[in-house]
Amino acid sequence: MIELGLKIDVDTERGTQIGVPNLLKLFDELGIKATFLFALGPDNTGRAIKRIFRPGFFQKISRTGVVQVYGLKTLLNGVLWPGPNIAKKHSALMRDVGKSGHEVGIHCYDHIFWQDNLHKLKEPIVRQEVNKAHEAFQEVFGFLARTMGSAGWQASHHSLAAYDDHNLLYASDTRGQKAFFPQVDRRIFTTLQIPTTLPTLDELLGRPEYPLESMTAHYIKLMQPKGLNVLTIHAELEGMAYFDWFKEFLIECLHHKIKIVPLKTMAHKLLEKKFDIPILPLLQGTVDGRTGTLAVQG
Ligand SMILES: [Zn+2]
């Protein structure tokens, strides 16, 4: 039987307000439990506009229709007005996710700041961002976060060190094919990494070789019966603009007897055989369909 770990990155205020409730209702209908990771600080999505000057971004907006997906207000957050603090404004919505039996964790404090700057930041600043996210999480949920999956799959030796201080069950910052303990240079980190193994929808959308009609079949073909299967979706895409496609995708998975689980279920099982988990390098690499570099399994 194929097992699929399902992680939802909630990047924006709009995704929290609209995408999350949509997904909760759908998961409830289908009897699915998943992992929701929240952006807990200011929604400064508008600052991503500066990425227009980076190669590949124009291609991406025309592929996914970024204004249509994010909405004009979101795209001006942090540019024309201060970014709204997502956890402060929407804590009740976030708690609903936990109360519905889903795993909840941290995506980031400030998505744009982390995604654009992580590799330039000194260790204390990285630690401060991680700590701010944990404080905000605890304020919302009343318990300590046990998982993090970073914004834009951006991870470094500084972020992994900060993670190790927080007694996480696991983290999910990388793209790769199997669970591992990450090594950067000579340092081995103690927090288990469960990578995203499958391409994300926005990496495939709009490419002639992946028409939406055959996307589900493509995904199912990519899943490994005996290997690790982890899919990351976005509240703003699969929970909103591509909700109908995602619903069909999930129904098709259930028809194929694919068991959808939160990532913590995978982590508990993996950690029962902790000494079988390999130590592998965490490197900076590229993924087809995504701009810039991100953390990949070596
Ligand atoms: Zn994100």
Image (tube, helix red, strand yellow):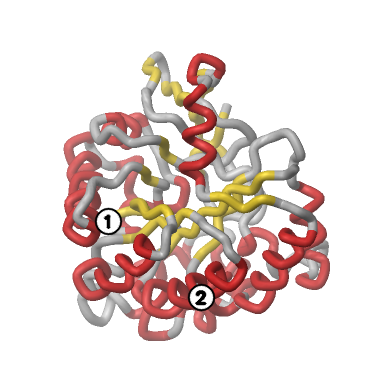
Residue topped by disc 2 = 25
Work out whether 96 lies above or below 135: below
| Residue shown at the point (65%, 56%) measured from the top left | 289
Where residue 190 sits: x, y (%)? Answer: 37, 23
Work out whether 272 lies above or below 105: above
Q: Depth check: 257 or 112 in front?
A: 257
Residue 109's disc number: 1
Q: Can residue 75 be seen in this view?
A: no
Work out whether 275 lies above or below 76: above
Cα gap from disc 1 to disc 2, whole angstroms: 26 Å
Amino acid type, callout 1:
Tyr
Q: Can residue 19 be seen in this view?
A: yes
Query: Where is the N terminus found, in terms of image quarters?
Result: top right
Answer few, some or many: residues within 10 Å of disc 2's Cα (few below 14, many 20 plus, some between 14 and 19): few
Amino acid type, callout 2:
Lys
Query: Left or right of 205: which side holds 73?
Result: left
Please identify, in this view, whether the residue under mark 1 or under mark 2 is nearer the observer.
2
Q: Depth check: 201 or 101 in front?
A: 101
Q: Confirm or reject: label 1 Cβ below 8 Å from ligand 1.
A: no
Give the mark, 1 or 2, whose residue is nearer the N terminus: 2
| Residue shown at the point (52%, 57%) measured from the top left | 33
Q: What element carries label 2?
A: helix
Q: What element carries label 1?
A: loop
Decide: marks 1, 2 in contact (CB < 8 A)? no
Answer few, some or many: residues within 10 Å of disc 1's Cα (few below 14, many 20 plus, some between 14 and 19): many
Residue 216's disc number: none
| Residue shown at the point (53%, 20%) measured from the top left | 273
Work out whether 292 lies above or below 47: above
Q: Give the total of numbered labels.
A: 2
Q: Depth check: 280 or 18 in front?
A: 18
Query: Left or right of 227: which side holds 274?
Result: left
